[in-house]
Image: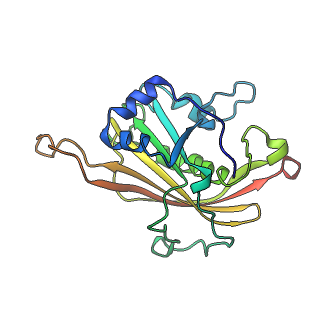
Amino acid sequence: MTAPKPYTMPDATKSAFQANNWTNSLLKNNAYQPIETYCRKPKPQTGEDTFIATIINTPTTIPHLLTLQRKPEQLAKPPSKAPSLPTPPEQWPKIPSNQPADVVNMLYFAEPDLNGHPGIVHGGIISTLLDELMAVSVATHLPGFDFANTEKFGQLFTVQLDVRFKRPVRAGAHAVLRTWCIGNEGRKWWVRAQLVQEESPIKPNGEKVEWVKKKYVCADAVGFFILVKDSKL
């Protein structure tokens, strides 16, 4: 595990997450450092990541996304064994209650271009984000890993992704997506993820919540990823 390349977050992104008490507290957590979100970087030469880097990187979709990686010296090594998967959700490997996330992704879901139901982000968008950002958690455990250097490191592919939706994900609101590597065998990696939102600041009767405190897991996921050399494709 090596330190990531220095990254300076855009001023607009920093301001967007400082404006919310919850995400601002995550920005101040010294156990994490901001890193570039590779999938948000346009790659016109290859067309890679176009959906996330371009289509849903607009003022009316996801204008702000910031990835925070746990500092290498504080990153817990995943177990060197494969979890027993697939299994029903109640039998998924547990996220250790005392283990901070490998990676914390902060997002702002704008409106209306992510909406499935009115004011609710489409589940397919959530699944895509879980898939893409869970891979970042794997990269944190690979010394010097570079998504762009496929000749040296290979490419990370999703073998299995299982998502359970527990609550609607509100548009026009912040969200936090946390990921943990829960197993590793050679080029095989297993990851857990949860997308969390705060309660709505507006009550069903239209009254404003005086102080937003409650946070809910809106989506829960487990994924299996494999690192494949270009020569094997």
Q: Residue at x 34, y 42 (%)?
A: 120
Colour setup of the view: rainbow
Which residue, as the protein is rendered here, is positioned at the far right? Answer: 231
Question: On screen, 188 above or below 5?
Answer: below
Question: On screen, 79 above or below 162?
Answer: below
Q: Is residue 127 in view?
A: yes
Q: Residue at x 43, y 30 (%)?
A: 14
- The picture places residue 218, in percent across and down from the top left corner, at 38, 54
Task: Determine which quarter of the picture holds residue 60.
Answer: top left
Left or right, residue 6 beside residue 143 = left
- The picture places residue 8, in percent across and down from the top left corner, at 55, 29
- The picture places residue 172, in percent across and down from the top left corner, at 33, 35
**Of 63 and 4, which appears nearest the observer?**
4
What is the number of callouts on the image? 0
Q: Residue at x 60, y 35 (%)?
A: 36
Left or right, residue 130 beside residue 114 = right
Q: Is residue 118 in view?
A: no
- The picture places residue 159, in percent across and down from the top left corner, at 67, 59
Q: Residue at x 24, y 50 (%)?
A: 213
